[in-house]
Amino acid sequence: MKKQKEPSAEFKAKGALEGIREEMTLAEMS
C-alpha cells in the first residue's frame, strides 16, 4: 500500500479551507 506520495490537490484544498476557517474564527474572537 503506497499511502503518501504527493498530497493530492483535493487534500491541499481541504487544508487551505480549514486554515481559512481557523483564521476567520480567530479574527472574530479577537
Image (spheres, rainbow, N blue to C red):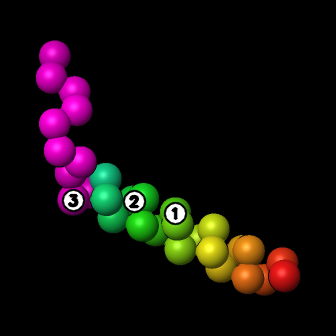
Please identify the quadrant where the N terminus is shown. Answer: top left
Please identify the quadrant where the C terminus is shown. Answer: bottom right
Using the rendered view, name the quadrant where residue 2 is placed. Answer: top left
For numbered disc 3, what is the local secondary structure? helix
Image disc number at residue 9: 3
Region rendered in magenta: 1-10
User: Label 1, on which residue?
Assistant: 18
Q: For mark 3, does the 10 Å Cα neighbourhood hold few (<14), some (14 to 19), or many (20 or more) residues? A: few
Quick one: label 3 or label 1, which is nearer the N terminus? 3
Could you tell whether 5 is left or right of 15 in the image? left
Residue at 72% across, 74% down? 25
The amino acid beneath tag 2 is Lys
For numbered disc 1, what is the local secondary structure? helix
Image disc number at residue 6: none
Looking at the image, residue 10 lies above or below residue 16? above
The amino acid beneath tag 1 is Glu
Q: How much space separates mark 1 and mark 2, taking CA atoms?
A: 6 Å
User: Label 2, on which residue?
Assistant: 14
Question: Are the residues at dot 3 and dot 1 in contact (C-beta closer than 8 Å)?
Answer: no
Residue at 73% across, 82% down? 27
Looking at the image, residue 27 lies above or below residue 19? below
